Every structure is written in structure tokens, then in C-alpha cells.
Image (spheres, grey):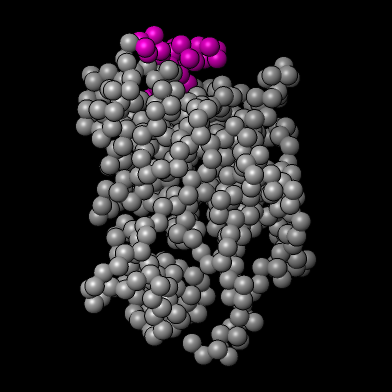
């Protein structure tokens, strides 16, 4: 591309620092970047609606596969209970990427933490009787939309469920952090081949822990069941003290032990396909069924004063069914009798009452240093997550396959730089275009279409964005 033209377009391109005030307003730090609370600088009535936004700066230079997947999906998804991506800003000079989202003042991690602290101090919290029901219904509504459009979220947990504060969408749930989401309508490979370890491990379904190669939307339903139980008890139901092991092996002994201590050991009559799980032999070698004979979900929830004959318990049982083929779907769950009894769920989970939860605090550089040393960890939200991660499992990282060398004429090493234009099919905009910038090539499994082919990070002047593309062969 002509250097002067690139310089001209860079000068004309809108800069995030010219449009928004966010200096000193960091509210979150995660694996893939920093999140800032931002307001528009333009004070005119036309351009300034008074709204607050979340600005997510992608860490490092360029764009990660996780961010690429998030951008590609959120550009297409539109639902009241899914976080809305407003705009993508790119700075070609320092190669920074900024994502602009709606700002959410609260998330379920902070809300549950607040209630847990109040319960320990025996302080009452004035919230609507139907608040948990409203939260769960909106989560199911958002997930039903994703599943209906063939999208698996694959990282549902309280910190990724945002709740809007004061404003037009007061009390509305927003599902965020789509960095691990994936289309699953027609994968050319088993999903486990591409991502063997998904979902933060406290919320990881048993079929994942047993190495299932073909997992389905049932993994999101299990995670929702874990969140529901946590909303009812203010404690993670499958809390495991051991750190999540960074490995491609999905088997996790301590996490399975925690699940069995609550649910009991799965019987073959209840889960017929358990024998087909890749880690079934390891399971039978490591565990004795007799140890868990007195463990049931009924006993666990009774300790937390949830009656086994209540409709909320019956729904929880359906969400936490061990056999994924028998687990309830999001559509079925939304029609459950639990949501038909009074009080009915509401769009404003706070029902017009004063919001008792504190607003997010701004972070300092000292907080970042603590996070780096492990004293404080923060989940990376697609919207405005700023949760401090005490008592939270560590975040995951995207798996990228190493470069492969081949003697084939059409194959090149990852260090090769293409210095001429080549036609590619852009998965984001769905059309063929010519790339007129150097393109870094690497071998990996495409995080969008699941094909194991050459991938490109393309700096495209035509569309003013950085996108992941696949070569047309």
C-alpha cells in the first residue's frame, strides 16, 4: 500500500482518545487486556447521550484469536441479554485495538460476594423476592439466543454475567466475554480436537472432565446450573481448592471428586454413555463408588435451606443432570413451572428498588502489580468486567498450534512474509478481497470455522480493521 495514503487514512481515522475520556478510570484487568470506564468528550446534545461505556484495550500489539472471535461473533449477535459491541477502534501507529461496549456497573461475581459477606455478618439485604428468578430467566434467554444461532459460549461463570446499573437498561442481564465462544453448526473436526480444555473448571461439565471429544450446548447448561446453585447458596457448588492445571488433558481428579461429593457417583443406568468417555478407565481406577453412596444434591441443598420439593430445586436438578443427553435445554428451562409461579421474573432484576451493591472501584497501577503476582486476579470481560478474582479459578488461555514445516509448494513457514497481494475470503465480512499489506502466516486451527488451515492476521486498509482470514484454495 502507498505509504502516503496509509499515513493520510491514519490521520483521518477516529482516535479513541479524541472521542472518550477514560484516563485514570481503569475498572478491570484480564488476560487479554484492560477495561476502562469511559464517557464521550463531545458535550453536544446530538453526540453525547450521557451514557457510560466500557473500553477494552487488547493487550500487546495486534489482535489475539480470542479477540478476533469475540469481534466476529458480536458484530452479528443482537439480543437484550448479550453484551453489545458498539465499535472497534484501531490505532495503526501503535497497533492497539480498542473495543467499545455498553458499561455494566455490576456482575454476578460481585453480587454473590456482597451477599456472602452480608450473610456472614448477619446483615439483611433488601432485594426483590424474585431477583434470583429474574437473573436466571434472563441468563437462559440470552443463552437460548446464542444456542439458536449455533453459538456455544463455553465460559459461563458469575464474573461473565453482567448486570446493568442505573439507566435505560436498569437491572438487565448481559452475557459477556465471548472470547471462547464458537460456532458449532458444522465443525469439520471434533470440538475437543480444537479446544480440549474449555470452561473455567468450577463450572466445567462432567463430560468435559472425562474427555468428551464431541461436546454440545449441554456444557453451557451445566454452567448455568452451577451459577443458579451459587445464587441460591452464595457459595460455588463445585468449589475445588486445587489450581486449574494448565494442560491439554481435560481430566481433573479433584474437580470430579468435588462433583461426586455433591451429586454422588454417576450410575450407568443414569448415564449410559459414561463407558464411552475417553477417561472412563482412569475414572474407575481413581474413584470408588462406595465412597459417595450417601452424597446427593438433595442433602447439599437442604444444608442451605433449599427444600427438595420446591420448584427451584426441581429445575436445578434438571440443569445439573450428569448425562448431557438428558440435561434440560435452555428453551425447556424457560418454560419450567418455576418461572410460572409467583413472583414472576422481571426485566429489571432490582424491581425498581434501590440497588444495594457498590459501584465499581477504579484500579491503580499497584492493583495491576498485585494481579501480576497472583495476589489479585481479574476476569477479562467482553463488556465491563472488573471483578477481582479472589476465590475465582484462574483464567484460561487460547491454545494455538505451533508452526509446522512442510516441503509442499503451497505451504510456508510461520516466519514467511507475503509481500504481495493475495485474494482471501474474509470470514468477518463474507467477501473476497485483495490484501495489500504484509501478511503474517501461521498454522493453526481456525477459531471461527474450525478448519485446520493457514491462518492470516491481516491489516486491511480497505475495511479499517484487523481480521482473521482463511486462504481460498
* Residue located 39% across and 9% down the image: 294
Asked if residue 165 lies in the magenta stretch, the reply is: no
Task: Name the residue located 31 percent from the left edge and 56 percent from the top edge.
Answer: 450
Q: Is residue 237 left or right of residue 448?
A: right
Q: Position of residue 353 (x, y in %)?
A: 70, 32
- Magenta-highlighted stretch: main secondary structure? helix
Residue 95, compared with residue 303, is above or below; it is: below
x, y percent for residue 298: 44, 13
Numbered range of the magenta stretch: 291-319
**x and y percentages locating residue 370 in the rendered image:** 69, 44
Residue drawn at x 49%, y 15% is: 301
Q: Residue 79 in the image: state x and y as whole percent.
A: 49, 50
Is 359 located above or below residue 309 in the figure?
Answer: below
- In the picture, measured across the screen, residue 197 lies left or right of residue 190, that is right
Quarter of the view holding residue 469: bottom left
Which of the image's four quarters has the C terminus?
Answer: bottom left
Q: Is residue 304 magenta?
A: yes
Amino acid at each position: 500500500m502507498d505509504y502516503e495514503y496509509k499515513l493520510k487514512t491514519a490521520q483521518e481515522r477516529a482516535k479513541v482518545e479524541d472521542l472518550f475520556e477514560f484516563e485514570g478510570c481503569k475498572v478491570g484487568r484480564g488476560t487479554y487486556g484492560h477495561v476502562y470506564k469511559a464517557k464521550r468528550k463531545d458535550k453536544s446534545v446530538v453526540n453525547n447521550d450521557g451514557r457510560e461505556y466500557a473500553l477494552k484495550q487488547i493487550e500487546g500489539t495486534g489482535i489475539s484469536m480470542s479477540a478476533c472471535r469475540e469481534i466476529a461473533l458480536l458484530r452479528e449477535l443482537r439480543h437484550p441479554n448479550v453484551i453489545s459491541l458498539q465499535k472497534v477502534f484501531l490505532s495503526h501507529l501503535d497497533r492497539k485495538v480498542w473495543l467499545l461496549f455498553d458499561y455494566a456497573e455490576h456482575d454476578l461475581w460481585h453480587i454473590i460476594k456482597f451477599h456472602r459477606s452480608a450473610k456472614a455478618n448477619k446483615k439483611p439485604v433488601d432485594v426483590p423476592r424474585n431477583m434470583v428468578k429474574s437473573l436466571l430467566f434472563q441468563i437462559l434467554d440470552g443463552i437460548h439466543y446464542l444456542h439458536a444461532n449455533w453459538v456455544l459460549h463455553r465460559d459461563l461463570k458469575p464474573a461473565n454475567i453482567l448486570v446493568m446499573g442505573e439507566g435505560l437498561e436498569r437491572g438487565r442481564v448481559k452475557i459477556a466475554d465471548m472470547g471462547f465462544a464458537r460456532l458449532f453448526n458444522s465443525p469439520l473436526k471434533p470440538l475437543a480436537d480444537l479446544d480440549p480444555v474449555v470452561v473455567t473448571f468450577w463450572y466445567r461439565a462432567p463430560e468435559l472432565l472425562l474427555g468428551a471429544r464431541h461436546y454440545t450446548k449441554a456444557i453451557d447448561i451445566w454452567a448455568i446450573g452451577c451459577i443458579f446453585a451459587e445464587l441460591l447458596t452464595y457459595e460455588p457448588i463445585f468449589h475445588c481448592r486445587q489450581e486449574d492445571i494448565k494442560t491439554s488433558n481435560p481430566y481433573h481428579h479433584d474437580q470430579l471428586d468435588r462433583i461426586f461429593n455433591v451429586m454422588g457417583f454417576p450410575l450407568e443406568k443414569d448415564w449410559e454413555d459414561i463407558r464411552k468417555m475417553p477417561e472412563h478407565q482412569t475414572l474407575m481406577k481413581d474413584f470408588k463408588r462406595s465412597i459417595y453412596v450417601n452424597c446427593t444434591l438433595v442433602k447439599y441443598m437442604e444444608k442451605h435451606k433449599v427444600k427438595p420439593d420446591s420448584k427451584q430445586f426441581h429445575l436445578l436438578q434438571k440443569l445439573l443432570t450428569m448425562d448431557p443427553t438428558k440435561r434440560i435445554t435452555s428453551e425447556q428451562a424457560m418454560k419450567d413451572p418455576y418461572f410460572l409461579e409467583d413472583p414472576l421474573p422481571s426485566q429489571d432484576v432490582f424491581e425498581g428498588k434501590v440497588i444495594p451493591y457498590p459501584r465499581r472501584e477504579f484500579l491503580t497501577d499497584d492493583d495491576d502489580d498485585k494481579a501480576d503476582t497472583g495476589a489479585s486476579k481479574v476476569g477479562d470481560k467482553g463488556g465491563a468486567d472488573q471483578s477481582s478474582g479472589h476465590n475465582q479459578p484462574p483464567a484460561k488461555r487460547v491454545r494455538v498450534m505451533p508452526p509446522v514445516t512442510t516441503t509442499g509448494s503451497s505451504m510456508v513457514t510461520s516466519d514467511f512474509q507475503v509481500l504481495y497481494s493475495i485474494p482471501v475470503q474474509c470470514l468477518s465480512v463474507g467477501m473476497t478481497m485483495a490484501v495489500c499489506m504484509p501478511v503474517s502466516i501461521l498454522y493453526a486451527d481456525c477459531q471461527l470455522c474450525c478448519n485446520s488451515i493457514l491462518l492470516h492476521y491481516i491489516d486491511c486498509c480497505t475495511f479499517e480493521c484487523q481480521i482473521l482470514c482463511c486462504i481460498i484454495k
